[in-house]
Amino acid sequence: MSWKWLVGGLILVFVLLSRGESSPPQTHRFTVSVQTPDGIRTGTSVVTFQYHNPPWWYPSAAGGMSVQGEAVVVRLGASSVLFLPSTPLYSEGISKPSALKTYDLFAFRDSRYLDNNGNIKFDRDFYPFLVYFKDFNDPNSWVQVRPNDFSSAFGPGYRLISIKSEVTTERPTFEKFREFPKLFEAHYGLRGRKQ
């Protein structure tokens, strides 16, 4: 065996050992329902998550997550739109306020937050990240919405009814990008990744 074959074999072994295992993909249909002065408004989206574990030889390394599918968009009125991103939004040094206990949707993969069918059971004390934008042309104008205080964001008569998740075999949705192109281009948490 020549040294080239030996080196090639060692490189292949290293690559294989360096790869961490990935969890099976999980696909959920998310539905957000909001009470408004003009009735109930809902929005849905199908999102697939897959968690990538660090390699066995470096367990302290951070894992990764891939997302396919876009944010849930709920039109509450002529100019008010609620977004449920798959991951919190970060821009120009702004990060998720630590005072609000909100999380990436994939944080709910923990079995404590799943029912017997694998659907997520959202808790008022453990809610996903919700935002609205003051200006649809300004990706940095997002404001986080407290799940128990919609009136501060949208006015009297607005109330979050529910956020539901259902395991599904549907394909991830990519339909809303053209409605808010500047926002979706700027934030991975809104657009996800299309394969």
Image (spheres, rainbow, N blue to C red):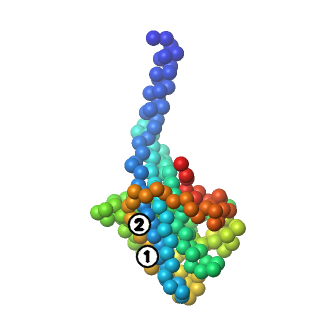
Q: Residues within 10 Å of mark 1 (few under 14, many from 20)?
A: some
Farthest top residue in view: 1
Percent coordinates x, y for residue 188 in the rendering = 59, 57
Query: 4 or 83: nearer the eye?
Result: 83
Q: Is residue 114 above or below residue 163?
A: above
Labels 2 & 1 near each other (Cβ < 8 A): no
Query: 29 or 22: nearer the eye?
Result: 29
Distance of mark 2 from mark 1, alpha carbons? 10 Å
Q: Would you name the residue on which mark 2 appears?
A: 165
Farthest right residue in view: 137
Percent coordinates x, y for residue 191 in the rendering = 58, 59
Disc marking residue 10: none
Name the amino acid type tagged 2.
Answer: Ser
Q: Would you name the residue on which mark 1 appears?
A: 162
Q: Residue at x 67, y 70 (%)?
A: 136
Q: Is any part of residue 144 visible from this angle?
A: no
Name the amino acid type tagged 1.
Answer: Ser
Q: Residues within 10 Å of mark 2 (few under 14, many from 20)?
A: many
Percent coordinates x, y for residue 19 in the rendering = 45, 37
Q: Residue at x 68, y 62 (%)?
A: 182
